[in-house]
Image (cartoon, rainbow, N blue to C red):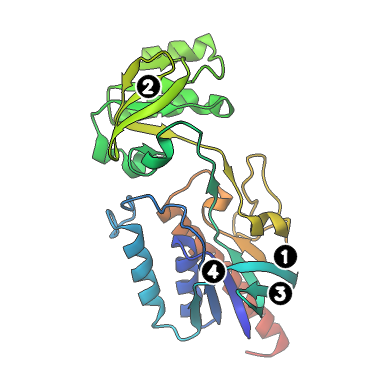
């Protein structure tokens, strides 16, 4: 079987790209398998006309809308490997090898959650990454920010940003690193408290966070905890050898979304720290337009149009 484009990943980026390419009359295979990165999330927010939509519903509607385009095929199958070059890729989809002229990666990222008792169970329910996505629902409650040494440069601006939603913000360093005095002064001036003691566990009632318990037994009231855990690429992306930036995100051309490997494009969370459904969807359409343009030019040059 031969396709114009194979899209790996069926989240907002992949669905949007498939829609745009289907409307451009390209033959597309959308492969969607494996756990969703936002599987724990209850709703999608800041997506105009879709605000508050459950992620599963968002995906179901996206797939339903693809049915109208006969050249778009969706498979719940993993992509196990990829060989060849631009214009002639061989892609392992499930137990089958298919051909594709272009490949678009929309695989998202893997979050490596910190080993704090209770955190994994609360991820997506009371432990979040983005206040724009989740802040409204928990506004004016006690919040915390679980800071990492690797994010020291972002500690002050992000902790102060949280004050837009609540007056009660505590930044937890866990005793893992020292915060410069000038940063401490800026945080104090903004009304952000600092807690340097190591964390023992998160205290919760079901999926409702109540407090952060420190190793000395003290409990800091906290109903929403924000964290930016380390992320890594999925195995397929690492195996392809596409160029990564210093933070581990896939480097892409800002206009075409093409990676360092000719004919392989990438969109969505795997390319940027600015992660969110609407950003991913927009990047998917951008990549689709670039891919469609390149393929159409090739067909025109060969006289196949």
CA separation in Å, label 3 and label 2: 52 Å
Looking at the image, is mark 1 or mark 3 nearer the viewer?
3
Q: Earlier in the sequence, mark 2 or mark 1?
A: 2
Circle 3 SS class: strand
**Front disc: 3 or 2:** 2
**Which of the two discs, 4 and 2, sits closer to the camera?**
2
Q: Earlier in the sequence, mark 1 or mark 3?
A: 3
Q: Quadrant of the N terminus?
A: bottom right
Q: Position of residue 124 (x, y in %)?
A: 37, 44
Answer left or right for 136 relative to 131.
Answer: left
Kindly identify which residue carries mark 4.
Answer: 288
| Label placed on residue 213 | 2
Q: What crowding class fits label 2: few (fewer than 14 Cα within 10 Å), some (14-19), or many (20 or more)?
A: many
Q: Would you name the residue on which mark 1 appears?
A: 262
**In this rendering, which labeled residue sits more in front, label 2 or label 1?**
2
- Mark 4 Cα-neighbour bin, 10 Å: few <14, some 14–19, many ≥20: many
Q: CA distance from mark 4 to mark 2?
A: 47 Å
Q: Is residue 224 above or below residue 23?
A: above
Left or right side of 264 for 200: left
Q: CA distance from mark 2 to mark 1?
A: 50 Å
Q: Nearer the viewer, mark 3 or mark 4?
A: 3
Q: Farthest bottom residue? A: 304
Q: Position of residue 163 (x, y in %)?
A: 32, 26
Residue at 43% in and 50% down: 276
């Amino acid at each position: 079987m031969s396709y114009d484009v194979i899209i790996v990943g069926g989240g907002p980026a992949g669905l949007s790209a498939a829609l745009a390419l289907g409307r451009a009359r390209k033959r597309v295979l959308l492969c969607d398998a494996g756990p969703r990165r936002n599987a724990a999330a209850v709703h999608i927010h800041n997506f105009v006309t879709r605000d508050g939509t459950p992620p599963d519903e968002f995906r179901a509607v996206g797939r339903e809308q693809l049915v109208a385009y006969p050249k778009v095929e969706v498979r719940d199958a993993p992509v196990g490997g990829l060989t060849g070059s631009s214009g002639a890729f061989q892609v392992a989809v499930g137990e089958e090898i298919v051909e594709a002229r272009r490949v678009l990666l929309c695989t998202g990222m893997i979050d490596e959650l910190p080993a704090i008792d209770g955190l994994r169970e609360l991820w997506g329910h009371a432990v979040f990454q983005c206040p724009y996505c989740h802040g409204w629902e928990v506004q004016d409650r006690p919040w915390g920010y679980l800071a990492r040494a690797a994010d020291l440069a972002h500690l002050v601006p992000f902790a102060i940003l949280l004050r837009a939603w609540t007056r009660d913000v505590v930044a937890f360093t866990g005793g893992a690193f020292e915060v410069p005095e000038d940063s401490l002064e800026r945080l104090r001036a903004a009304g952000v408290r600092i807690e340097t003691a190591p964390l023992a566990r998160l205290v919760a009632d079901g999926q409702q966070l109540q407090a952060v318990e420190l190793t000395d037994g003290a409990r800091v009231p906290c109903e929403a905890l924000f964290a930016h855990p380390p992320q890594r690429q999925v195995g397929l992306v690492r195996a392809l050898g596409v160029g990564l930036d210093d933070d581990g995100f896939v480097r892409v051309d800002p206009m075409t979304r093409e990676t360092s490997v000719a004919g392989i494009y990438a969109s969505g969370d795997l390319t940027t720290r600015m992660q969110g459904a609407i950003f991913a969807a927009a990047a998917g359409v951008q990549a689709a337009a670039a891919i469609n343009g390149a393929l159409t030019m090739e067909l025109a040059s060969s006289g196949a149009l």
